[in-house]
Each structure stands twice: as C-alpha cells, then as structure tokens.
Amino acid sequence: LGTVYDRTAILDRNIDITQSASFTDHDCTWIFPSTYHWDFSGKADLFELEDAVIVYTDGAKGHSSQPKAETIRLINVQYRIEGNTSRTDFFGGQSGFEFSNVQIISYGSGLNYLHLNTEGGLMEDVAVRVGAGALAFQPSSSNNNTLTLRNWTLDPSLGLIQGNGGANNLTAVTRLENLVWERTEWHIGTGTRGQHYKVINPIKPTGWQSYKGSTDTTKCRCDEYHTHNVRIVDEDNNALSGFAVHLRRSDGTVVYELTTDSNGDIAEQEDRKSNV
C-alpha cells in the first residue's frame, strides 16, 4: 500500500472504501502523493478520523469518488490539498457531517471544491484556509432540513458561499452562526441553487459594507439575524414568572408576545435584521 512511519502512511495507490463499509482511525497521518486518493466506490456507512491529518499532494484527485458516507465524523482533523493544478474535491456526494475542531486547507493552484451536501446537521469550530488557487465553498441542506455551521472562520480570499444544486428551495436552511469572514462584502447564495442562508450573530470585519446574493429571493435568499435573551426580575433580583414580554417594531408590527417561565426567562429569540 505504501510506506508507513510510525503513525504516518505515505500511499502508493488509492484506498478503496466500498458501499456500506466503515473506516475509522485515530492519531494518524494519511499522505496521498501523485493522483492517489480516498476512493469511495459507494456510500460508506461511516468515515471517522480523530486527531488526524490528511494530505493530498501533487496531482489532481478528481471529485466523484472522494469521501462520502452516511456519517463523516472528523474530530481534531486537518485536511489539506496542496500542489495540484486541476480540480480536487474534499468530499464526494451527499453525506452526514459531524465536525469538531477541523481545518480545511486548500493550497492547490487550480480550483478545488468544498462540497458539504447534507440532509442537515451540525459542524462547529472549523477554519477554512486558501493558500493558493481558488476554492468553491458549497454548504447546503436538503429541503425541510437545517444545516448549522457554528463558529466557522473563512479565508478572506474565499469569495462566495453557494448551494449544491437547483432541486432545493427555501425550506432547505443553512445557518451560519458566529461566522468570521474578513471580507467587506459577503456574497452568499446564487439564484439557481436553492437555499435559505441564515447568518446568525455575524462577526464582521472593520469596514464591512454589505451582502451580495441572489436577485431571485423566491429561490435563494440570505437573511441576517441577531439573538437576544430577556429575564424579568424584581428589585431583589428574584425571577418573576408569568410576565408578558412584547417586542414591536417602530411601525407597530408585533415581533413576538411571550410570557416568562419559572426562571423569569423567555426562550432565546432571533430577530431578522436585513436580507439580500
């Protein structure tokens, strides 16, 4: 298969993972030179790596046979593409993703793709870096589901967030919570790729200007939301339950009418600020 040094494997062929298979590893480094790569001939049940590094180097690896599984679980993982001059994708078809503390790094001189084509789920604490070339970032949920990307940092050279196809509509939701993206204009969504992007509590750079996105908001739209909490207490800081809390806009439109619980709280609220 290649050369192994302790927990590092340098491959001299593809690693084939078949339909319904499971692959797990930890405390490891997988290096794929030339055109070698993970070769998913079908959709696996599980692809799981923890405390791991994946390096795609040299030649282009293609796209359709890249990792795809019912569950792709990456914990404390760096996944790096470097040196290729043509297309390489990080992942293949629709999968269930579970990410925690993951770095996605694209150093190829061509155009690489980060498809996150999902039926919903949660991926948090992810950094996406682009060292050279270009990277297409395509996170999306299927219809009537929600994908949450929480605490993501995107490279400023990454210019666009868009979906994965025309079959989805506004019931397919992707939430971008606490997004850090050092660009003054955020281009999120294109008209031919249905998705409702919800940007929650964004962390914008100095000089931030505006959103840019689809002109057909019946197919794809982006809205910005901010969350807030309310607790009602008396002068001795005792919680007051059963109190009415109303929020209205300046024109009198009711945003919500709620009642405090036994702790004096209402559920956390999300208020839409703007849309593109």
Image (cartoon, rainbow, N blue to C red):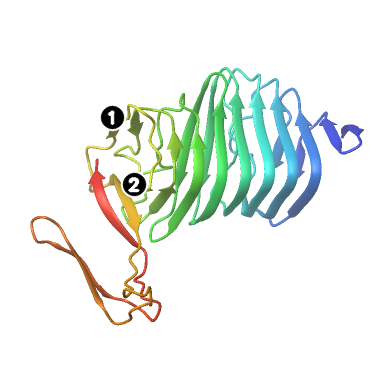
Q: Residue furthest front?
A: 236
**Looking at the image, can residue 116 be seen?**
yes
Residue 194 is marked as 2
Assign a secondary structure to mark 1.
loop
Q: Residue 189: x, y in percent? A: 34, 39
Q: Is residue 164 left or right of residue 250?
A: right
Q: Residue at x 79, y 48 (%)?
A: 25
Q: Residue at x 43, y 54 (%)?
A: 142
Q: Is residue 142 left or right of residue 116?
A: left
* Residue 151 or residue 162, whichever sits in front: 151
In the image, what residue type sits under mark 2?
Gly
- Dot 1 alpha-carbon crowd within 10 angstroms: few under 14, some 14 to 19, many 20 or more: few
Above/below status of 257 relative to 166: below
Q: Is residue 246 left or right of residue 85?
A: left
Assign a secondary structure to mark 2.
loop
Quadrant of residue 188 within the rendered picture: top left
Q: Residue 47: x, y in percent? A: 69, 51
In the image, what residue type sits under mark 1?
Gln
Residue placed under numbered mark 1 in the picture:
209
Q: Residue at x 63, y 39 (%)?
A: 66
